[in-house]
């Protein structure tokens, strides 16, 4: 996609430091660098945000080749399993659900086909999502109370939310601090921001190096580990910041695809839980 827009040389999206270290991973014309000041990993140079948003708005983003997903729909079963377990972790911490049944209002930014929103029906009484792809939005509308085309700015909801969830979204965000501030503006006092993102600090990244699937250049422009994900929420004023376990399950076919080998036909539907691929954190909007 480098020919579709001008490449830019951003400052660190976490602390604003303009001086980046030498590229640690190169994906010409892009590179993943580490901030000299706060050690945050990010993409530099990167494609302009406008060009990326155009890509996200294509229906082929979720069902196509190259940029995006080969087939997001093909991952439905494993995604739902991961989401159910994650919702259980949120419920155990009082972030999702209410005693005696569903309660509160959930917002999901980047909801894709609405799998997480639908799995949340037992935890939240009102479920709202957003996404940029029109075809995905139409499907998600059958699984939630309301879904808007676009990002946070597209929301036409006057009542504040109890929880804002972003599942594998923050790594796409060009200005994460402003993004969190916008989310907090949509929450009631005491509401929760929940972020889940690929784990840059994982053993998988260290073992696989540049073959780590979650580099996903040029889409992913920021790369968080446990320390930097917590810092983002704290720096934006969140309280009670905590890590939340996030377990991911993948089909053997998907694992083989990411590793560059073809799983035997008889084993492709087998599912494996892989620890450490994703990290999640939650932070609470101050009540005062």
Image (cartoon, rainbow, N blue to C red):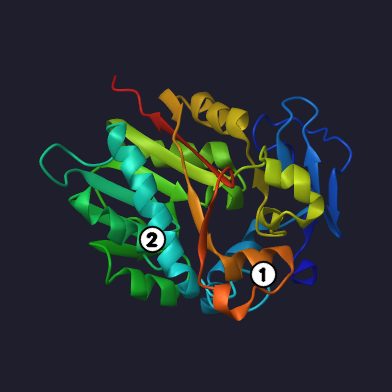
Tell me the tag on residue 80: 2
What residue is drawn where x is 46% and y is 24%? 237
What x and y, as percent, mark residue 231? 57, 27
Q: Is residue 10 left or right of residue 80?
A: right
- Whether tag 1 and tag 2 are in contact, CB under 8 A, the answer is no
Residue 235 visible to the viewer: yes
What residue is drawn where x is 26% and y is 52%? 157
What x and y, as percent, mark residue 182? 44, 41
Within 10 Å of disc 2 (Cα), the crowding (few <14, some 14-19, many 20+) is some
Q: Nearer the viewer, residue 45 or 102?
A: 102
Q: Is residue 167 above or below residue 73?
A: above
Tell me the tag on residue 257: 1
Give SS at disc 2: helix
Q: Is residue 81 left or right of residue 127?
A: right
| Residue placed furthest toward the front | 266
Give the quadrant of the N terminus: bottom right
Q: Is residue 274 left or right of residue 244?
A: right
Query: Residue 215 falls in which quadrant of the image?
Result: bottom right
What x and y, as percent, mark residue 164? 36, 44
How many numbered markers are drawn? 2
What x and y, as percent, mark residue 232? 55, 31
What residue is drawn where x is 67% and y is 69%? 257
Q: Work out whether mark 1 precedes mark 2 in sequence or the reverse, and give the earlier one.
A: 2
What residue is drawn where x is 50% and y is 52%? 248
Q: Is residue 154 above or below residue 38?
A: below
């Amino acid at each position: 996609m480098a020919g579709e827009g001008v490449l830019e040389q951003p400052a660190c999206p976490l602390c604003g430091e303009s001086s980046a270290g030498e590229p640690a991973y190169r994906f010409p014309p892009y590179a993943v660098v580490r901030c000299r000041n706060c050690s945050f990993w990010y993409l530099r140079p990167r494609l302009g945000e406008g060009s990326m948003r155009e890509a996200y708005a294509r229906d082929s983003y979720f069902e196509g080749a190259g940029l995006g997903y080969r087939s997001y729909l093909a991952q439905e079963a494993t995604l739902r399993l991961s989401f159910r377990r994650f919702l259980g972790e949120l419920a155990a911490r009082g972030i999702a659900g209410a005693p005696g049944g569903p309660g509160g209002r959930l917002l999901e930014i980047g909801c894709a086909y609405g799998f997480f929103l639908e799995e949340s029906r037992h935890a939240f009484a009102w479920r709202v999502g957003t996404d940029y792809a029109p075809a995905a939005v139409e499907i998600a509308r059958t699984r939630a109370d309301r879904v808007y085309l676009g990002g946070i700015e597209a929301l036409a909801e006057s009542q504040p939310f109890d929880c804002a969830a972003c599942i594998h979204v923050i790594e796409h965000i060009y200005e994460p601090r402003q993004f969190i501030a916008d989310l907090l503006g949509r929450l009631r006092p005491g509401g929760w921001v929940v972020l889940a993102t690929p784990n840059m600090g994982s053993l998988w990244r260290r073992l696989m190096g540049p073959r780590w699937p979650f580099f996903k250049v040029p889409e992913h422009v920021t790369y968080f580990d446990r320390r930097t994900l917590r810092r983002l929420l704290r720096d934006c004023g969140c309280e009670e910041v905590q890590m939340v376990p996030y377990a991911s399950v993948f089909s053997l076919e998907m694992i083989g695809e990411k590793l560059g080998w073809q799983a035997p036909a008889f084993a492709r539907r087998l599912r494996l839980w892989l620890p450490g691929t994703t990290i999640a954190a939650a932070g609470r909007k101050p009540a005062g």
